[in-house]
Image (cartoon, helix red, strand yellow):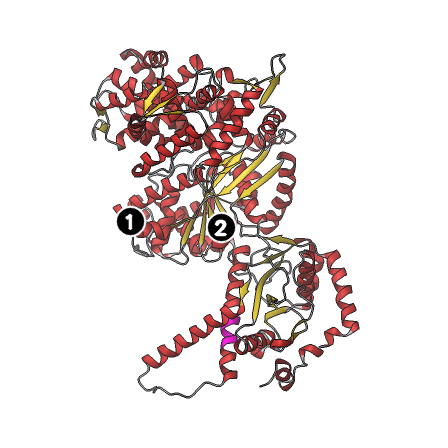
């Protein structure tokens, strides 16, 4: 049997163990070229580094696609820097007849037969087939000299673009000189060569069996295929598998080839789907098809992104500077789960929306971690001079805030979305529609979600996976603006002047930003659950209506996305401090008590996490307090009996925003604490009944994920958690009690009981208004508008101006839940709400938490005379008309 070196000699190649590379001159050349490259090239490393410690039993080889001396030297430098087995050292194993002069395998090697396979890979596969005990791990590596995607129809490929062709020496020298500081390396997870060989062997056998079974003229034979030919086939298969793997990794980093904006618009307008839409538009509007096509072209120009890699590079450098100036750090959680899906799935990022900064921050984090930048659906209110074109060149495609009734605009947007999805372009859109002004998640807007589903059902290229993403700040630029808008001030329009005003805040301290990528949601799982068939819509139509099953699937998917965003919440120092201090009387606590309450919340949230994806700060309670003072959100008042920590002047409304970011994590605990604290003693079974009655409304408001069927079990676990921390006393015989009134645990229980009260106060006030006005006298819209006005009045008079009562979305959420659960019935013609005495049961359960004084205040506030109702509704309608006129 020939050894690998003998085979090499026989084939005309020099024996690997006697290669000229071991000559002193070549070693000197490697050293000098490595030093020169180290000075010119400063690569960024993407992803988590694999564990590649050298051992005596496993041989390590690095897999690259294209032959290049500079790539060889670069990988050698990187392996040495990260203490991996060296890429340019001899790999010897005399026991298995292996003696290679380097540990790099180029899949497309110029010495390979027909350029198809690597000679070194072939030799290693020969060794694996001869020695089954041989252990060889292959580490695929991607090197990018620049990250500009290819232009689809360009006549001249830019030298600075890292493309799919074999790099020439001239190109490599140009890349080193020009792109040396814009070079990226990723070491992918190691793969076992023996496993790859077995998979290739099984694949070959399967194809042979199929060929024998399906051929009528082929007869079975016992003749053996020559070993050399069999190994060559295995090498081809393994080589192809590794090439495909690296192609996918490269595509996930660079994104799809680009098409010029003008060409893309032409392809959109003349697609079969938009041809049909233009014909329908022309018929309905009484215009020519050419005129309809021109209208569609105008819509496309409004919408389509105009990706520019130079603008991306400008943003990269600017944002790297900005985040350093603005924040103390950007902390990212669970990103590797996204990387694992990026090669084989169409990625749709669905983050919550807290700030205008979200657009840039999320894209920046994705880009810096080595994945292709997503195209972001942005409101056309951002398409302002200077800023708008720059965002369009970087991340944004613009959509109108409202286009209901405009069938042609909808068709153009749907076809553009379909084009992005079928080209495997990652997409990002904010499922809430707009920015949250209170810190809670807003109800999901299903429009973009429905378009994504519509596209997947027209044609499926890759399976769609949604990535719920939580974004949490410790200060936000728009904080003061949000509070003003909730109190009734007009929303400020975006403009260049507004942008310049924001830049004045750059010197302020904004703390850390937290991005947490939640558990992915696969559309195929929802399609199976709701019995929705793949590719069930015609490919050439954008106006095919969705059936009931698909509509139900979209609604369920929207809610699940919101729940998964909340699961991925980060309980950061500011949100935790806000939750504690805003629950205390006058938003102030003794510093020792404040420390103990923070520590208690950390223990509770850690002992029984809201979800495995939820992250809780490990900063010490004292450090959290000092951090809040540093951010000027709270202040310490010295006192001889002990310093007092209190919310800084005018910061309570802003802190309520950050408290609401994490309210869902503690809301059930707060509910249980309030029920026990308000009643002194209460049966476990009574707790279950009350929680079961009111939980659906809390679940709708805060997108809690606990299913109703296991709610009782969840409640018992939460009770046991509170008992373990001494906040509730188990008296036996199904009875629970508060701890001693003079104890620290009792004071902690009262603080924990406070956060639930505002939600129940809103519920009770809404029910009081309905009861006072009577069944059939108000519409859903009128109830929400009146409650909004009453909430504003209540907040100013009694609730320290906290903006939770100003948000109409919270009242709408409660009313919608009442309708969905059939407590309210809407008349189809008049839209009036009808109800019976069952709504009194909800109000009755609220009495177990709210004090008689609070309920009396709420009833007084909700008591309106007919004349007051009429005047209020008239003013609300007039305001809406003026607002609608401004939008038009």
Q: Position of residue 734 (x, y in %)?
A: 31, 27
Q: Total marks drawn?
A: 2
Quadrant where the C terminus sits is top left
594 left or right, relative to 660: right
Quadrant where the N terminus sits is bottom right
Q: Position of residue 59 (x, y in %)?
A: 61, 68
Closer-to-camera residue (6/169): 6
Dividing the picture into quadrants, the one containing residue 609 is top left
Which SS class for mark 2? helix
Q: Which residue is mark 1?
A: 530
Q: Where 505 falls versus 425 (above or below)?
A: above
Is label 1 or label 2 in front? 2
Find the distance from the CA under tag 1 to the CA under tag 2: 26 Å
Q: Where 789 falls versus 59 (above or below)?
A: above
Q: Where 543 falls versus 644 (above or below)?
A: below
Closer-to-camera residue (56/230): 56
Q: Is residue 235 magenta?
A: yes
Q: Which residue is mark 2?
A: 337
Residue range corresponding to the magenta coloring: 234-240
Residue at (53%, 27%) from the top-left corner? 598
Closer-to-camera residue (834/11): 11
Circles 1 and 2: CB atoms closer than 8 Å: no
Which SS class for mark 1? loop
Q: Position of residue 565 (x, y in %)?
A: 44, 40
């Amino acid at each position: 049997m020939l050894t690998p070196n003998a085979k090499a000699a026989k084939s005309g190649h020099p024996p690997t163990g006697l290669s000229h590379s071991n000559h002193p001159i070549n070693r000197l050349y490697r050293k000098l070229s490595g030093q020169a490259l180290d000075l010119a090239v400063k690569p960024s490393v993407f992803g988590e580094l694999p564990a590649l410690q050298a051992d005596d039993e496993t041989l390590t080889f690095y897999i690259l696609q294209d032959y290049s001396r500079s790539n060889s030297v670069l990988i050698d430098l990187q392996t040495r820097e990260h203490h991996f087995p060296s890429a340019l050292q001899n790999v010897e194993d005399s026991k298995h007849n292996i003696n290679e002069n380097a540990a790099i395998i180029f899949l497309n090697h110029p010495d390979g037969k027909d350029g198809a396979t690597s000679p070194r890979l072939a030799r290693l596969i020969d060794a694996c087939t001869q020695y089954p005990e041989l252990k060889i791990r292959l580490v695929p590596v991607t090197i990018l000299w620049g990250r500009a995607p290819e232009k689809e129809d360009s006549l001249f490929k830019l030298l600075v673009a890292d493309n799919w062709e074999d790099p020439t020496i001239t190109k490599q020298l140009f890349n080193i000189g020009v792109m040396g500081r814009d070079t990226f390396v990723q070491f992918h997870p190691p793969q076992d060569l023996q496993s790859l060989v077995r998979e290739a062997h099984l694949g070959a056998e399967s194809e042979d069996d199929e060929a024998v079974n399906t051929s009528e003229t082929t007869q079975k034979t016992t003749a053996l295929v020559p070993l050399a030919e069999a190994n060559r086939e295995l090498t081809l298969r393994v080589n192809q598998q590794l090439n495909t793997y690296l192609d996918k990794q490269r595509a996930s980093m660079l994104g799809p080839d680009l098409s010029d904006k003008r060409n893309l618009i032409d392809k959109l307008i003349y697609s079969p789907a938009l041809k049909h839409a233009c014909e329908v538009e022309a018929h309905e509007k009484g215009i020519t098809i050419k005129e309809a096509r021109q209208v569609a072209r105008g819509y496309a120009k409004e919408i389509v992104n105009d990706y520019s890699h130079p603008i991306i590079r400008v943003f990269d450098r600017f944002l790297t500077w900005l985040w350093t100036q603005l924040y103390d750090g950007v902390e990212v959680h669970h990103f590797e789960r996204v990387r694992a899906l990026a090669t084989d799935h169409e990625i749709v990022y669905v983050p919550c929306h807290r700030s205008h900064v979200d657009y840039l921050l999320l894209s920046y984090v994705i880009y810096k971690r080595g994945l292709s930048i997503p195209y972001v659906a942005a409101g056309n209110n951002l398409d302002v001079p200077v800023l708008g074109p720059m965002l369009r060149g970087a991340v944004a495609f613009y959509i109108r805030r409202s286009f209901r009734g405009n069938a042609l605009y909808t068709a153009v947007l749907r076809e553009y979305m379909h084009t992005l999805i079928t080209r495997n372009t990652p997409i990002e859109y904010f499922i809430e529609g707009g920015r949250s002004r209170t810190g809670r998640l807003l109800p999901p807007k299903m429009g973009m979600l429905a378009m994504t589903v519509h596209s997947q059902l027209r044609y499926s290229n890759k399976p769609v996976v949604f990535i719920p993403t939580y974004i949490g700040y410790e200060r936000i630029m728009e904080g003061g603006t949000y509070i003003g808008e909730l109190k009734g001030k007009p929303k400020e329009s975006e403009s260049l002047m507004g942008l310049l005003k924001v830049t004045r805040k750059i010197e302020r301290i904004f703390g850390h930003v937290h991005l947490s990528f939640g558990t992915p949601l696969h559309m195929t799982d929802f399609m199976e659950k709701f019995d929705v068939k793949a590719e069930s819509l015609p490919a050439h139509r954008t106006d095919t209506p969705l059936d009931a099953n698909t509509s139900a699937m979209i609604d369920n998917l929207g809610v699940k996305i919101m729940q998964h965003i909340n699961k991925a919440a980060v309980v950061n120092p500011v949100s935790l401090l806000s939750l504690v201090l805003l629950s205390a009387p006058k938003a102030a606590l003794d510093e020792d008590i404040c420390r103990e309450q923070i520590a208690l919340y950390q223990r509770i949230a850690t002992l029984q996490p809201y979800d495995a994806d939820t992250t809780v700060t490990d900063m010490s309670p004292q450090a959290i307090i000092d951090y809040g003072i540093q951010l000027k959100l709270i202040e310490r008042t010295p006192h001889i009996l002990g310093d007092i920590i209190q919310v800084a002047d005018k910061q309570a409304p802003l802190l309520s925003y950050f408290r609401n970011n994490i309210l869902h994590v503690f809301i059930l605990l707060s509910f249980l604490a309030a029920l026990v604290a308000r009643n002194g003693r209460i049966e476990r079974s009574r707790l279950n009944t009350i929680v079961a009655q009111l939980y659906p409304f809390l679940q709708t408001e805060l997108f809690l994920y606990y299913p109703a069927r296991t709610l009782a079990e969840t409640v018992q676990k939460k009770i046991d958690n509170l008992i373990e921390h001494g906040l509730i006393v188990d008296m036996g015989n199904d009875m629970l009690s508060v701890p001693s009134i003079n104890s620290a645990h009792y004071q902690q229980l009262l603080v924990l009981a406070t956060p639930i009260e505002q939600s129940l106060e809103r519920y009770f006030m809404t029910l009081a208004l309905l009861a006072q006005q009577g069944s059939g006298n108000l519409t859903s819209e009128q109830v929400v508008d009146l409650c909004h006005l009453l909430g504003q009045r209540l907040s100013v008079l009694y609730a320290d101006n906290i903006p939770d009562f100003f948000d109409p979305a919270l009242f709408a959420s409660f009313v919608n839940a009442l309708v969905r659960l059939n407590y309210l019935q809407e008349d189809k013609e008049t839209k009036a709400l009808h109800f019976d005495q069952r709504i009194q049961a909800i109000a009755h359960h609220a009495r177990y938490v709210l004090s008689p004084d609070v309920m009396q205040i709420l009833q007084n506030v909700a008591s309106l005379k007919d004349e007051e109702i009429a005047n209020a509704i008239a003013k609300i309608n007039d305001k809406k008309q003026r607002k609608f006129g401004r939008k038009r």
